[in-house]
Amino acid sequence: MIDPNGQTVLLGRYSKPGFVFILNSQSQNLPTRISLLELAQSGKDHPAWEELLGYYEPFIGRILVHMGVARSDLDDVCQLVLMRLWKDLVNYQYQPQRARFRTWLSYLIHSTLVDWHRKQGRNQTTVSSDSIEFGEVLMGQSELELRIQAEWKEYIVNLALERLKTIFSGNAVDVFVRSVEGQSAAEISQQLNISEESVYVLKHRVKKRLVREAHELRRELELPDDNR
Amino acid sequence: MTSDHSHREAIQRIKPIVDDLFDQADPSHAFGDCLESDDEICPLYCSISRIKERYQEPELIGRGGMKEVYRVYDARAVRHVAMAKPLPEFSSDQYDAFLREAHLTARLDHPNIINLFDMDIDQKGRPFFTMELRHGHSLRAVIKSLQDGRSSEEFPLHQRLDLFLRVCDAIAYAHSRRVLHLDIKPENIFVGDFGEVKVCDWGMGVVMAREHGGNESTVLLDPDLYGSLLQSASGTPTYMAPEQKDKRQQKTPQMDIYALGCLLQEMLTLNAPVKSRSGNSGIDSALAATIATAIETDPADRYQRVEEMREDISRFMLGFSTSVERTSLRREAALFFRRHREACSIALGLLTVLAMCVTFFVLQLRNSREQALNAEAVAVEARARSEESRIIAEQAQLRAEQDQRRAEQAQQLTESALVEAEHERRSAEESLAKYMAEKELSNKRRYRQVAAAARHSDFVIDSALQRDMGLRSAIQFALDHMDSILDFHPPPASFAWTQKFWILFLTQDFQAALNLVRDGKEIHPDLVQLAEKYLPHLNSDGHLDTGHFIAVMQELISVDRWRAPLAEKMMIYDGIHDRSPEDKLAIARAWVQINNSLWNREGMTYDPDTATVRLRGNGLTHLNRTIAISNRHPNRFSLLHILKPKVLDLRGTQFQDLSEVDSMQLLELDIRQTPVTDLSALQGNRTLRRLLMDPDQVSESQMASLPKSIEVMLGSE
């Protein structure tokens, strides 16, 4: 977030509706380009960091909710995770053997959460229901990676789908969704009142574009996995 | 939010392939590896490339002398087009004629000439070409429906003429390209649903030979190739110019013009063209003339160019006379009116209004002129009258002037009279003032006189009281004098009236006194009351009896102490009246009592024979009036005046002042056992002969100063 003086305010709280896809308009047409993540490593003052936060914050928030963090604490924990993420980004940059992206992210979230719970525990002498959840979180560390993997997939595809909305007319995405659901081309053409030919065309074009957008997003937002 | 929701839904719906999609989008792979072929992405291209048969689904829609036309679907252009094929019976040596038409048509690029899309040779080796296909009818069908009376609203005269003009445009354009149609007829003219006009079927067309010397770059087709005509093919006889029937004849634009004339005639009359005047019945003369010119037998008499004919038609449509028409002035006017219908209507309307206005104005003018004439006559008359009246007025003025002069004189007189009157008035005022002053003076004088008379009467009475006998006449004299004064009629409040009342009252003439009151004179009300009270008690000789008299005296004193002099005078006047000595004593005793309030009233005796008065008792101190004493009413009478004593015995009283006995002419005085110590009052006494007193009562010097005539007797007895 940029304050009136033009400086980046560290880890500001974001209003999610005001979220801007700079990525889409700015960096798409560059044939070989540095990913958003790499750009963000160059410094917190870089606009890329701002953009990156826009992508990561909702996702991390979602994960935290899944992990049972109370709504009232959500913003605080989220900020903590993002802080860790920033530090890790800088620190892990040049390590030759990197963990997989999802492993890294789950570790990040998990350890932050543990720290936070510990802190909470110190602050609260009485044993509360949080401690039970804390135990669950500790136990679920291995599951967390899987969950993050699944959530991240869905998140990326959903982002790509949202972008398609701005590229195609409403019908096109609908055609694609229907075809995935198993409707035949004839059925779709009848229900949406378009020619069968168009159904074929749209179906393929949407899918192709969807993969392309997801590809783009992953390239921008993930650390490349070496072991793949 | 709804879009969010729908996307959330969308992501749920495509969940099965999310993993697959995500893996495909692995950034470590180069993008596009896993995508399908372009065929699926660009189906149009693929489908076109896959098309084997371009023209599909042929459907015969027409047949001409040389070719038949199909409606086909162009799979590549994805549209329906018209496809022309030579008649099946045509052999290959006749194909050139067919292709010639295609070339001619392709060459003509005009909105009113049918467009050629494609020409080729099919698999069977037969040539074909495709043209635009439009929804609509041929002009033949239109004319037919007009004949049936169905489309008369759709195609009114001007619409048909407009349509004809488009045909002219097309032909004129073709002629400019040196292409002759030579088969113009309703069947070859296409009328679209939206009014578009296309000239079709250029199969009979020829390219005109190049003119000598002409070097037109626009001529692309070789006349040698396209100029000749297929022998078998021939035009429709009805629309064919007479010279066209001669096959050897050079083709000229006039042939097309002839056909156009026939076409126009048919479009207007809806009948097959005939070359006679009667054929033009029911047509406007201008159009009839145009048709007649176009279908002249001799080509030289016809229009030389299509544009001329077109010009005439459009002139007619715009309401002008055509070039071939013999126009009269009336005709021109009618045309003019037709051209400018609204303007003419407005102008005519305005003219009418103007004319009405002018008429109205003229009428008004005439009316006002008549009125003016009348007014003039009236004015002349009035002037004559006014002249008369002027003379009269002048006379009147003269008279008025005279009057005025007279009035002025009168005014002057009046003024002088006024001045005199003023003088008079002033002198009158002066004399009045003098008179008033005089009168005032005399009044004053009279009042002084009255006052003087009143005082005089007072004085007269006072002095007269001394002498008893003259009193009555003195009173009468005073009354007379008062009356003489009162003849001046002094005001009722005047002192004189009171004076008269007074005099009358003291003489006990109450009646006369009350008469004054009745006459309105202002008298003291207490006296009036007394007069009224005692009036009834007067006896026959006009006097009160002793009792009432004493009562009057007492009442006078009690009412007002200052009435004491009046009471005294009344008593003295009464004294001259003949009363008995007892009555006189009673009156005197009452009087002494009044003036010595402490006296006990006892011890007063009177002996008339010796004129001796003896007084005894305490409280007797004075023998003169003691009440109402003033300078104005001097004390000159003794209390015992009416008794006229000669001997007075005051032994044992408190009497002190011997001067009080001075007024009495005593012969003998006894003052023994009195407080008298001063005998000086007796020094001038000439009547006293004997004085009785105590031995040591006075000093020796007192005794010595006594006159010699007085005999002093000392001793207690």
Image (cartoon, helix red, strand yellow):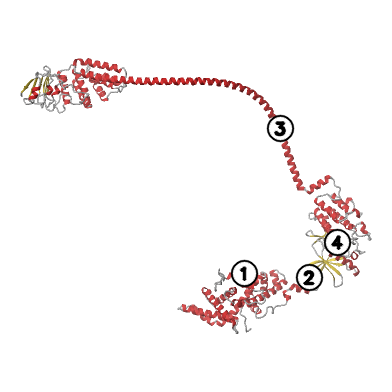
Cα distance between the residues tagged 4 and 1: 62 Å
Residue that mark 3 sits on: B369
- Report the disc number at residue B3: 1
Residue B250 found in image quarter: bottom right
- Report the disc number at residue B76: 2
Mark 1 and mark 3 on one chain: yes
Q: Nearer the viewer, mark 3 or mark 2?
A: 3
Name the subunit of mark 1.
B
Task: Say whether disc 4 or disc 1 marks the residue closer to the N-terminus.
Answer: 1
Task: Say whether disc 3 or disc 2 marks the residue closer to the N-terminus.
Answer: 2
Name the subunit of mark 2.
B
Res B11 visible: no
- For the C terminus of chain B, which image quadrant? top left
Query: The residue tagged with tag 2: helix, strand or loop?
Result: loop
- Residue at 81% across, 48% down: B335
Res B157 visible: yes
Amino acid type, callout 4: Arg
Name the subunit of mark 4.
B
Q: Position of residue B215 (x, y in %)?
A: 88, 62
| 10 Å crowding of disc 4: few (<14), some (14-19), many (20+) | some
Cα distance between the residues tagged 4 and 3: 78 Å
